[in-house]
Image (spheres, rainbow, N blue to C red):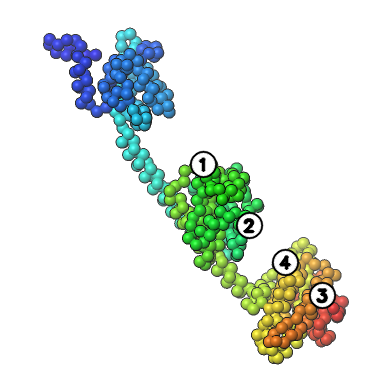
Amino acid sequence: MASNYGAGQPDRMPAHFFRKLASGVPGILFTYWLSPDGQSHRYPYVSDQVQDLFGIEPALLNEDARAVFSVIHPEDATGVANSIVHSAQTLEPWCYRARLKLLDGQYQWFEAHSVPERQPDGSTIWYGQFHNIQHYKELEQTLRDSEAEFQFQAGFQKLIARLSGEFIQLGFGSIDECIDELLRSIGGFFGIDRAYVYGFSQDHLTMTNTHEWCAPGVASLMADQQSVAIQEFQWWQAQINAMKSQNQVVFIEDVNQLPPEANNERALLELQGVISMFCVPIWIRGQVMGFFGVDSLSQRPWRQDMADLLIIVSGLLSGALERNRLEEDLLNQSIRDPLTGLHNRRYLMPRLDEVLATCSRHGERFCLAMFDIDHFKRINDNLGHLAGDQVLVRFAELLLANTRNTDVVSRYGGEEFLVVFTELADANVQPLVERIMHAVRAEKFVIGGETFGITVSAGSVCVAELTEEPVSPHALIGLADQRLYQAKQGGRDCLVDASGLSRI
């Protein structure tokens, strides 16, 4: 290994000289020998630190190098072997990083630097050293993590800013599209399998999946999650109560770890393939009206601040939904009668235009009836306007109870009400009007200790009667109003339609 060290010195330096020399060098000094055929290898010299670090005696390595290769991390072993072969073939310096197992069983990173030299017999010897670089790898990882965290936070802030802008600029009626876009964006950003919004019924006894996004290949649950009875899930009901009272986020890290009282919840989630989930309350006007949630269908590490991030998303949803609720209220106030809650004339006229357009395109027939409460002025004069208001409200309720959901029921003005019977042939309107008039006649009012009944007069018209083109809402209403006037003149409590006056 050394020759001609100095005049009078032996050709081979004593071993203790190299031990002293190596003890002052960080890391492990070595010479590594590889046979010409690559089938055998050994360390002619290796410093004593190899025993301190790995528990391998240097004398053993002088005969065979396999003990060192046995402590290389399995994921790095192939790379180390290939790099040695490459260095032997090209005689390029061998430099490599790999994880080695220490005496305490932990793996740490080491880096080797050595120079190869071809021997006369075709074998190769490397002269070099390897040292622990764990500290630098940890620092490197910390820097990478910091950069990744910075990029994540910047990306999240950019996403929230974009979604906030979309919610601010959304037009009335587009809230559903914006929520769908939010769920899609959040699902993609966090790499989750399902994102959704649930709404509670007013009594908080049922919940309904109103919006949902699913990753490709993940089945939708929305159809099966309509009006779900919460009482069947006692543990979940307790979590909902915690949402309402403490603004608490529900985090299920592993469905299999749910407590025994959550057996029903565990069975349902397992059926849905859910492994872990987050649910965050949605607040509207100071009340929890539902929750925003995300599911994972596999085990995954969640960020420690995941709950905080989802609270930000939920806050964005809450603000958008509260604004939408306000806009709905304002719209309802503008198109509904404040006393009876029925639609008013402002809603009726455009709606009639839509019905007429459908009739024109598809030939769907409809009829219209105008009702007027008989002798309504007497009620106001004798019992007062509050009594008159009670009669109007009750009559509106009777109209709703005796018409179909597809019909348009409105207060036209004063004591006059108008009903548009959609998808109705001419011959079928009279039984519907008759049912309403019978219901009114049978109703008994008790106001101020006085019991009395009321009747109504009605005039009806069907769109098929008007042959002039185009038919307009004003023409229909005008004819219905004219027939109502005829019913009043005919003695009240009757209907006038195309066939004339009918006592019902």
Task: Indicate left or right for 120 with 184 as reference.
Answer: left
User: Which is more toward the observer, 379 or 355?
Assistant: 379
Residue 109 x, y percent position in the rendering: 34, 31
Toward the front, the furthest residue is: 260
Q: Which mark is residue 405?
A: 4
Q: Which mark is residue 104?
A: none
- In the figure, residue 481 lies in which quadrant? bottom right
Crowding at label 2, few (<14), some or many (≥20) Cα neighbours within 10 Å? some
Type of amino acid under label 2: Ala
Q: Quadrant of the N terminus?
A: top left
**Label 1, on which residue?**
299
Residue 365 x, y percent position in the rendering: 79, 67
Residue 429 x, y percent position in the rendering: 82, 71
Type of amino acid under label 4: Asn
| Among numbered discs 3 and 1, the one appearing first in the sequence | 1
Mark 1, secondary structure of its residue: loop
**Label 3, on which residue?**
434
**Label 2, on which residue?**
229
Q: CA distance from mark 3 to mark 2?
A: 39 Å
| Among numbered discs 4 and 1, the one appearing first in the sequence | 1
Toward the top, the furthest residue is: 121
Q: CA distance from mark 3 to mark 4?
A: 18 Å
Q: Quadrant of the C terminus?
A: bottom right
